[in-house]
Image (spheres, coloured by chain):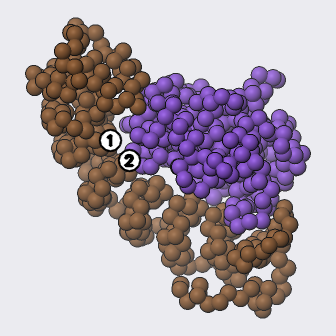
Amino acid sequence: MKGEEERERIPIKERPEWADVRPVPQDDGPNPVVPIAYTDEFSETMDYFRAVYLADERSPRALHLTKEAILLNSGNYTVWQFRRRILDALNADLHEELQFLDQITRENAKNYQIWHHRRWLAEKLGEHVANKELEFTKEIFCKDPKNYHAWSHRQWVLQALGGWEGELAYCSELIKDDIFNNSAWNQRYFVVSKSPLLGGLEVMRDPEVAYAIEAILTKPENESPWRYLRGLHKNDGNSLANDPRVASVCLDVLAGKTDYVHALNMILDLLCHRHQPSKELKDAVDAVSPDPNLPDAGLAENVCSILKLVDPIRANYWEWRKSTVPAQD
Amino acid sequence: MVEKHIKYIISIEKKKDDFASVVMEHLRLNGAYWGLTTLDVLGKLDAVDQDEVVSWIMQCQDQSGGFGGNIGHDPHLLYTLSAIQVLALFDKIDVLDIEKLDIASLQNEDGSFFGDIWGETDTRFSYIAICSLALLQRLDKINVEKAVEYIVNCKNLDGGFGCAPGAESHAGQIFCCVGALAILGSLDHVDKDLLGWWLCERQVKSGGLNGRPEKLPDVCYSWWVLSSLIMIDRVHWIDKKKLVDFILDCQDKEKGGISDRPDDAVDVFHTYFGVAGLSLLEYPGLKAIDPAYALPVDVVNKIFLTT
């Protein structure tokens, strides 16, 4: 594509193939008082676009013009829509279109119109582009591993076109690159619960709890694996309270005496679901309590008080949690 | 600073020829909503020529009844809502031929909504369709039960919502889903404690709010996270003062306007969200704004309390 862009641009009004078309200016603005060259090129392209759009001309030259317009401003959704009409009318090579789209997406990875156009294309091309689409989103994730559009596209590709085989491993790879990548953790949950190849949540729970725990121990301040752990137990407090590994990882984190906000929060949840704390757990909480000689407040209330101090920005939340601690039997 | 923000917005409205305006030409109707709602919240809606704006908006309406982002553009739900909202600001919803607006045809069997005839689905469009029809008082046109069902299908185990079932929880999508459910009186489908916690975890040390775990704070989340918290009665779970300070820090103190985070360039989008966020935080001197309809409360009241 490089050659095409580097060639000096010939104004459209000087191109013989456009001689028969009268450009249509923008309806609401006067001509620029101080025209900038780039704005001139842009205005001219859009004026000619308006002409073919109003004439509903679905020709090769119109197709080329939409490309020029897109290269100047990829956000104009009317241009994209008209391009789709032309592609259909000309029965154009959609694989070529996908290549064009690859190029544009790399420069504009957060553009809704581009991703929608991509889905439209992929739907038409079908299953045989599944791998290509998965590879392309991987390419996007190399630069921006949390790109919401790309993740949405990838999830759609997996469900509509297939390709689940390497997905869990890919999530592991991304998490290894950045353990804080919440999108990768979300995708992991998506794979574990929806992949037709893995057997579902019940089957996967055990190894995945182990995986989450390892991640928690690596970076206890990381929100994602804690949420993932809760998700594996479907947020059921009783289920979490009955899994000894959960209390165990909380204890391990507390023993480290640093980055323990999420651990304390989890302990609080366990206590609120009738988990019987071990002596080690009580001692570990005391060890991080600013005032271990507090009057006989329950362990749960104690945990809330600590949280108010170490996570003061959410003090009101922790105060509310304190108020919902169930009465001791 | 209020004067400076007003000046900034009016200058945007006037400047139609610079490059920034030209590339945003196709979504001018959104820009109008952001700019004019901000002016109204700041008490200065009278600074613009109402008739000129209304006349321009009506020229954005397509034959199909939907609105494009500007004159001559294809219709899309995104711009249709902005059109309705701006007309609401001017108390001119009655200029619309409601029968012409066929939003209901965009609803799918599973309850989701397309943005337009090209078939993109996203929970943003659920919110837009529901908010639009609610403002027009024609929610009877869609299958509300199915619409709710689809939104609930987009609920994740962390209590949040994504753009489609299985998609990562994201504050912007959460606003859309919670807003839609609020408008439909269906907030019982939201686990308010669970979601409230997820939302209050968006507040980072600087006091700003991010949209997902481990991402940078951005002023626009002051709207999406905040309005969601208000709709589920959990706004006291964040540190309001720190958030106010963060938003104020994002102002351009010389030229007016607000940016996504301190020291970045301002734009009308973030100016609107910053001001709207401050209004939700009850910053003095601002009109109250409705968290679900994203319009000043007096505008919303006028629609629903008068027949």
* Amino acid under disc 1: Glu
Q: Which residue is mark 1?
A: A223
Residue drawn at point x = 64 percent, y = 69 percent: A73
Residue density around tag 1, few if under 14, some if 14–19, many if 20 or more, within 10 Å:
some
Whether residue A241 can be seen here: no
Q: Position of residue A315 (x, y in %)?
A: 39, 25
Q: Which residue is mark 2?
A: B214
* Amino acid under disc 2: Glu
Residue drawn at point x = 41 percent, y = 40 percent: B205
Is B238 on the left-hand or right-hand side of A236?
Answer: right
Q: Position of residue A101 (x, y in %)?
A: 53, 72
Q: Quadrant of residue A226?
A: top left
> In the picture, which chain is purple?
B
> In the picture, which chain is brown?
A
Residue drawn at point x = 41 percent, y = 31 percent: A313
Q: Position of residue B267 (x, y in %)?
A: 64, 53
